[in-house]
Image (cartoon, rainbow, N blue to C red):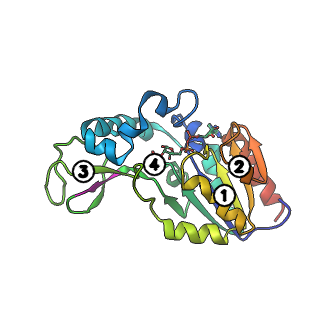
Amino acid sequence: MNKSYQNIVILTGAGISAESGLATFRGANGLWNNYNVQDVASVEGFARNPTLVHQFYNELRPEILKAKPNAAHLAITKLQKEYAANVSIITQNVDTLHEQAGNENVYHIHGQFDQYVCLNCGHIFHNLNDITPQTPCPYCLVKGRLKPNIVFFGENLLYMDKVETLLETCDLFLSIGTSGTVFPAANFVQIAKKNKAETYEFTLEETSNNFFFDHHIYGKAGETFPDFVLELLKRT
Ligand code: OAD
């Protein structure tokens, strides 16, 4: 951290929401210890058993709705308000804690928990109610074609054109709370690095793609990231 930056990209994963009370996917108490990822988060799983997939997201929704942004989300708001750079957030999280904290320029590459898409008419709509395979689309009224607007394994990520531009032009890449195991997001650091960005990761433990990071800051993001932002602001 020895210069001022113009274009900052922050990649976030489940770890940034852990201190808000939301479970991560991997590790002790991870969601994927209790559910088979291929059953509830893949195109094939959804085709095989949509009832199970709807039930999974119907149960997750109230948990997400209870959560409030934590100090790491709020530190991003501070950075966006007080540091003279473009700061963009690429999040793998389907919660909306970034928005609740007042973060701007947020790209949900894995979709959002509060949206559904109708596979019949293509409408994407806001929804906080329980959904079953019998629920009709509020637009075309056809039953059985609603899908959580969440990117399942086997589907393309959202906003990828914008994301590529952000990665190719950033001079500081910060990764917070992601294990670096799910591609292509795990590869974003490599693209940023290739374009000479300085790279930091904030995580509890060593990640799968740690060799691409210049700096590793271990600990709870709600503690480490606000300190990092203060340090950055001091150097402007
Ligand atoms: P993971 O559960 O794989 O990894 C969470 C990471 O956060 C780990 O590296 C932890 O060390 C770290 N962590 C946990 N608590 C933390 C804290 N308080 N502060 C800082 N770091 C902490 O979650 P993701 O990498 O986000 O996709 O998983 C990527 C994707 O896998 C998810 O978006 C999801 C899943 O399948 C979909 O559902 C589409």
Of marks 1 and 3, the one in the foreground: 1
N-terminal of the pair, mark 2 or mark 4, is 4
Q: Relative to residue 68, is residue 85 drawn left or right? A: right
Of marks 1 and 2, the one in the foreground: 1
Give the extent of the magenta segment: 115-119
Find residue 214 and report its horizontal and vertical position in percent: 78, 54
Q: Relative to residue 1, is residue 48 drawn left or right? A: left
Residue farthest right in this picture = 2
Find residue 229 and report its horizontal and vertical position in percent: 74, 54
Q: Is residue 77 visible?
A: no
N-terminal of the pair, mark 3 or mark 4, is 4
Quote the CA–CA distance across marks 1 and 4. 20 Å
Q: Considering the image in quadrants, where does the N terminus appear?
A: bottom right
Amino acid type at circle 2 is Glu
Front residue of this view, candidates 158 and 19: 158
Q: Can you identify the residue that label 3 sits on?
A: 146
Q: Relative to residue 167, is residue 61 drawn left or right? A: left
Res. 94 mark: 4
N-terminal of the pair, mark 1 or mark 3, is 3
- Say whether marks 1 and 2 touch (CB < 8 Å): yes
Residue beneath the point at 77% across and 53% down = 230
Residue beneath the point at 62% across and 66% down = 167
* Ligand 1 lies in quarter: top right
Q: Can you identify the residue that label 2 sits on?
A: 201
Res. 55 mark: none
